[in-house]
Amino acid sequence: MTTIELSALDGRDPLGFLAVLGMHRLLTDETDAPIKLSFSDSTGNALLHSDLESIDAITEVLAGIVARAKDTTAIVDVDDRFPLAKPSKSGAAARETLGQKDPMRVPREQYPALAARIADLGSEAEHWFHCLVTDLAIDEQQRAALTPFCAPVGQQSLRSFFMNPLQEVRKDPSYLKEALTAWRRVDKFTGEYLDHRVVRSAADHPHGKSTEAGVPGATWLATQALRLFKLSGNGDTVTSTLWHRRPRHNLMIWPLWTEPLDLHAVQGLLEHPDINSTPNRKLLRTMTIFALAAAERTQLRGPKSARVLTPATTNW
């Protein structure tokens, strides 16, 4: 078994950690050999333990997955109609559709009908659906709640959250290797707001212009992690693996560990009740956890802007 340090995937960073999990899931599903994950306690970078002997070998497997996508694919190996898309119209009808709500976001009472419609798209679509939308909680508009990993604004939708990163990587597969080795930011790519650094002012940009600039490869990998997380709610407030309720907001908290773990063990660790905002360090160290990291949704450009996933502090 070869151990490879992935220099671009810092587990202390929310996008880096989610991308690592997405990669771990994809490689596990795609290969027959054992795939294990840990983190360096000196750099925080992800360590992949597998029979894949190089970055290029890892990239080749990921590229093979992307190659199965079509122009209409949002999630590889899932019915291309999932997540549901807004109706396509032209002329005056198109202007009406522009303001139409995401068909995946419905009032709670319409959730059973939506779930039945998704079930007709196959078991994979159904499994993904239950990781993304739940009627066990509601949002501000009394709709069935989305996973806290998604925070769409404007014309963004649950479908675009998955489709945009995938189609970007499809157009340029070199983004996959960059996701593992050295991130390159791409102008006008939102990164689906999983990365606070996507918001760049004119002072930040090398060409002196204000634009969003995300990392397509890492973002696509991060979206693929959502299938690992349990989604639920208490009737009003949504809960998900890694997310913890604070008085006024949710906080995402995750561990970094040194023991190589397969995907099932990683899922069990992430769901452990002692991964929280008041950690028992002695207990966590028995599980080889050496750090807890955190992130929260922050509006960096005023009350009407996107809530971007931003690093936060923990009690570790």
Image: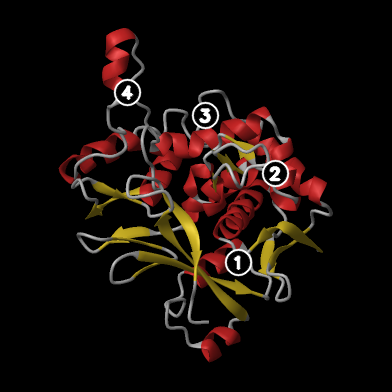
User: Which class describes the residues within 10 Å of circle 4: few (<14), some (14-19), or many (20+)?
Assistant: some
Expressed as whole percent of the image width and height from the top left, the position of residue 233 reads: 27, 61
Q: Of tags 1 and 2, which is closer to the observer? A: 2
The answer to whether the residues at label 1 and label 2 have Cβ atoms under 8 Å apart is no
Q: Secondary structure at mark 1?
A: loop
- At horizontal 38% and vertical 55% (from top left) the residue drawn is 148
Type of amino acid at the residue the image marks with label 1: Arg
The residue tagged with tag 2: helix, strand or loop?
A: loop
Left or right placement of residue 244 versus residue 112 in this view: right
- Label 4 or label 3, whichever lies nearer to me, is 4
Quadrant placement of the N terminus = bottom right
Task: Name the outermost residue toward the bottom.
Answer: 282
Q: Earlier in the sequence, mark 1 or mark 4?
A: 1
- The answer to whether residue 88 is left or right of residue 5 is left
Q: Secondary structure at mark 3?
A: loop
Residue at 40 percent across and 46 percent down: it is 306
Residue 27 vertical position relative to residue 91 in the rendered view, above or below:
below
